[in-house]
Amino acid sequence: MVMDLKNIQWFEFIFEDIFKIYSTSSGIDKNKLNSKKGSIPYITRTDKNNAIDFFIGEQDEKYKKEINNVITIGLDTQTVFYQKHEFYTGQNIQILQNEDLNQYNANFLIPLIKKQMVKFNWGGNGATLTRLKRSKIILPSKKGKPDFLFMEQFIREKENEKLNQFKNYIYERINEVKDFKEVKSINE
């Protein structure tokens, strides 16, 4: 089935109407981290590695881990990523949460959210939590609500298309190698 973005209803939503939006509860400055090694992502405003600066262990009680299955935003750096696992954060990270969010529909939403982030700058229209909450986004809609299922199915379909292209490419290369070996053995 080929999903078509043209035949879907689109509607403008205000961020705070579809997401619970809040600043992170931990916001641990890098120099205040304890030295415990571990597997918990430390999310910062970097635009690399899904915003993961490095992995750490459990931190002091005063710092709380953030829940998983959310989108993180570094407002001043305009970085937007999906977080599949619980994590700690550096400073100035905002979180978007919705019970219907998953890694697939998040991958549909992230480029659209990044487009909205462009309007924030370092001047008088800088990024703030209030401005983020009031921002608008146009999304696929069903019965006046964001169609998270459509977004998920669309991304799953695109992912499968890319995986099939890659698989076909690999099979073609394998067959080329087999053909080359057969020709080489005939010529020897």
Image (cartoon, rainbow, N blue to C red):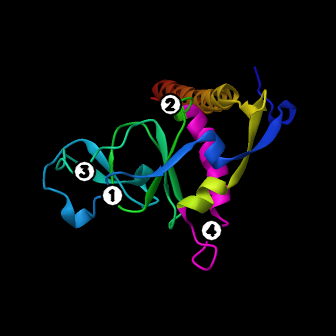
Q: What range of the chain is rendered magenta? A: 104-128
Q: CA distance from mark 3 to mark 1?
A: 8 Å
Q: Mark 1: which secondary structure?
A: loop
**Residue at left 56%, top 67%?**
127
Question: In the orientation shown, which residue stands out farthest toward the right?
Answer: 7
Q: Is residue 121 magenta?
A: yes
Kindly identify which residue carries mark 4: 120
User: What is the three-letter code of the residue carrying label 2?
Assistant: Val
Which quadrant would residue 33 be assigned to in this image?
bottom left
User: What is the three-letter code of the residue carrying label 1?
Assistant: Gly
Mark with earlier residue (2, 4):
4
Tag nearer the camera, 2 or 1? 1
Q: CA distance from mark 2 to mark 1?
A: 53 Å
Q: CA distance from mark 2 to mark 4?
A: 52 Å
Tag nearer the camera, 4 or 3? 3
Mark with earlier residue (2, 1):
1
Q: Is residue 106 magenta?
A: yes
Q: Mark 2: which secondary structure?
A: helix
Does residue 171 sit above or below 42 in this rendering?
above
**Residue at left 41%, top 52%?**
49
User: What is the three-letter code of the residue carrying label 3?
Assistant: Tyr
Kindly identify which residue carries mark 1: 27
Q: Mark 3: which secondary structure?
A: loop
Going by the image, does 152 lie left or right of 26? right
Kindly identify which residue carries mark 2: 177
